[in-house]
Image: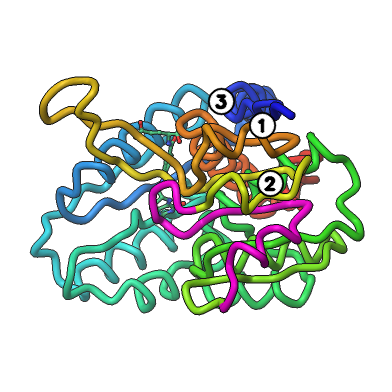
């Protein structure tokens, strides 16, 4: 079997276009959704992500507020910026790019964000709401994965889902979302006793471990849907000295022979993260103004 390739890039483009349509409608009513992104330090990958977030926010017709702070910024300085953004009515969504430089307490910073503006869905209140089935802001990457899965499979009820990875950003919220869809969910991780065998049970396999090409083709149940969240930069000597390429957590060339459908890296889950961030900002703006939420953009 050769798997269908799930085109996250195309899906994300359509999602951004839908968001832009809703934004245009809001703007005709005098409301402009606004997203504030805070970057502390100079991590090269984070700089690229933040630049892309700003560009795509503007392309969707929203207001973008970018705050770039020195790596030496203190916790208090960062918290007072968050307080200002919480109080600013032009800002409907606040995102602090992770990871933060050493010395800053990410947990405290995230929990200082107004939960209604927490478009990353990382605030403890949103985590709890998601876990208890209440209306929450849903973390962007897992939300994007869920959209791709629903688009591919329709009803996910009863499916055996295995999430490899237990991070707060992806693994845990992904498992919550799949549970909400009535999947039978296993969260596997580095201490799981027989990881290959656990993965072989999965109708839906979500890989979010951050280890290049760890999941091999013979770990995949024939016909399974594989969602690869990993974005790992590895040396590519075939392309020349010092060249690199991106690979996922799944060994794509092997997995494509076993799976029914699979997301590529790049071009799979990655682009969905920013598209869902825009969707969450629009949702937060509608909620802030007591307006109906556009359908299909969140849970
Ligand atoms: N506050 C947050 N920090 C981080 C998050 C997050 O959701 N919120 N996620 C990641 C990084 N990230 C967004 O911030 C992100 C990662 C990857 C992509 C993406 O489009 N990837 C492309 C490849 C890009 C490349 O060439 O390097 C792809 O997979 O096709 C977008 C956003 C950590 N921090």
Residue with the mark numbered 3: 9
Q: Nearer the viewer, residue 19 or 167?
A: 167
Report whether residue 112 is seen: yes
Is 210 a magenta residue?
yes
Give the residues drawn in magenta, as a range: 193-214
The CB of the residue at mark 3 lies under 8 Å from ligand 1: yes
Question: What residue is at 11 percent from the left and 55 percent from the top?
Answer: 70
Q: Which numbered disc covers residue 26?
A: 1
Mark 1 vs 2: CB contact within 8 A: yes
Q: Is 236 situated left or right of 25 in this image?
A: left
* 118 or 288: nearer the viewer: 118
Label of residue 128 in the image: none
Residue 166: x, y in percent? Answer: 53, 70
Res 109 → quadrant: bottom left
Is 103 drawn above or below residue 50 in the view shown?
Answer: below
What coloring was used for the rendering? Answer: rainbow
- Earlier-in-chain disc, 2 versus 3: 3
Residue named by callout 2: 286
Whether label 1 touches label 3, CB < 8 Å: no
């Amino acid at each position: 079997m050769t798997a269908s390739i799930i085109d996250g890039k195309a899906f994300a483009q359509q999602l951004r276009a839908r968001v832009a349509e809703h934004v245009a409608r809001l703007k005709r009513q005098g409301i402009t959704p606004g997203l504030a992104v805070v970057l502390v330090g100079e991590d090269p990958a984070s700089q690229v992500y933040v630049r892309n977030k700003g560009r795509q926010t503007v392309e969707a017709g929203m207001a973008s507020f970018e705050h770039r702070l020195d790596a030496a910024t203190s916790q208090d300085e960062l918290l007072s910026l968050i307080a200002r953004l919480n109080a600013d009515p032009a800002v409907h969504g606040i995102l602090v790019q992770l990871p933060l430089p050493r010395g800053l307490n990410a947990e405290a910073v995230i929990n200082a964000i107004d939960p209604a503006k927490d478009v990353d869905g990382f605030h403890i209140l949103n985590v709890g709401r998601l876990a208890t089935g209440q209306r929450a802001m849903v973390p962007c990457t897992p939300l994007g994965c869920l959209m791709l899965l629903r688009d591919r499979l329709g009803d996910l009820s009863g499916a055996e889902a295995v999430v490899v990875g237990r991070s707060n950003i992806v693994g845990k919220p992904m498992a919550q979302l799949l549970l909400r869809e009535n999947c039978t969910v296993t969260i596997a991780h580095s201490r799981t006793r027989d990881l290959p065998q656990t993965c072989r049970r999965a109708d839906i396999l979500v890989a979010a471990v951050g280890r290049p090409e760890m999941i091999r083709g013979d770990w995949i149940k024939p016909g399974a849907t594989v969602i690869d969240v990993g974005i790992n930069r590895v040396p590519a000597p075939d392309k020349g000295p010092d060249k690199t390429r991106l690979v996922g957590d799944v060994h794509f060339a092997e997995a494509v022979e076993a799976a029914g459908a699979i997301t590529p890296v790049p071009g799979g889950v990655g682009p969905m993260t920013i598209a869902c961030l825009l969707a969450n900002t629009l949702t937060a703006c509608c909620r802030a103004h007591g307006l109906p939420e556009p359908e299909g953009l969140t849970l």
